[in-house]
Amino acid sequence: MNYNTETQTEAFVELLEEKIDEFSLVLYNDDYNTFDHVINCLMRYCDHDMIQAEQCAWIVHSNGKCVVKGGVYEELEPICVGLLEKGLSAKIE
């Protein structure tokens, strides 16, 4: 019984460590970029398919922001830079 508890605790700690290192790339709404531009950028930089990119674009338009990708900071940073260079408003949180 003690072994099972230790195994469960170790698994829980590993899960927490993974979640602590995870960040979100958030895309924000603006009044300048077209839907087509946003969709194309999401497909190019976030590796979204057309449907996922369209859904994210609509969420951004409707709610003001959308988490478009999750992961470790080092993976999200070049994606965020790419989106920013294309004129989109994005931030890693």
Image (cartoon, rainbow, N blue to C red):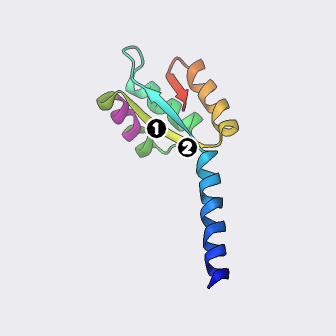
Tag 1–tag 2 contact (CB < 8 Å): yes
Please name the residue shown 42% across and 27% down the image. 36
For the C terminus, the quadrant is top right
Q: Position of residue 46 (x, y in %)?
A: 56, 38
Query: For numbered disc 2, what is the local secondary structure?
Result: strand
Q: Position of residue 59 (x, y in %)?
A: 34, 35
Query: For numbered disc 1, what is the local secondary structure?
Result: strand
The secondary structure making up most of the magenta span is helix
* Magenta span contains residue 14: no
Task: Name the amino acid, label 2.
Answer: Gly
Q: Position of residue 82 (x, y in %)?
A: 62, 26
What span is in magenta? 55-60
**Left or right for 36, reference 73:** left
**Left or right for 33, reference 23:** left
The 10 Å Cα crowd at callout 1, few under 14, some 14 to 19, many 20 or more, is: some
C-alpha distance separating marks 1 and 2? 7 Å
Task: Name the amino acid, label 1.
Answer: Val
Disc 2 target residue: 70
Location of residue 51 by image quarter: top left
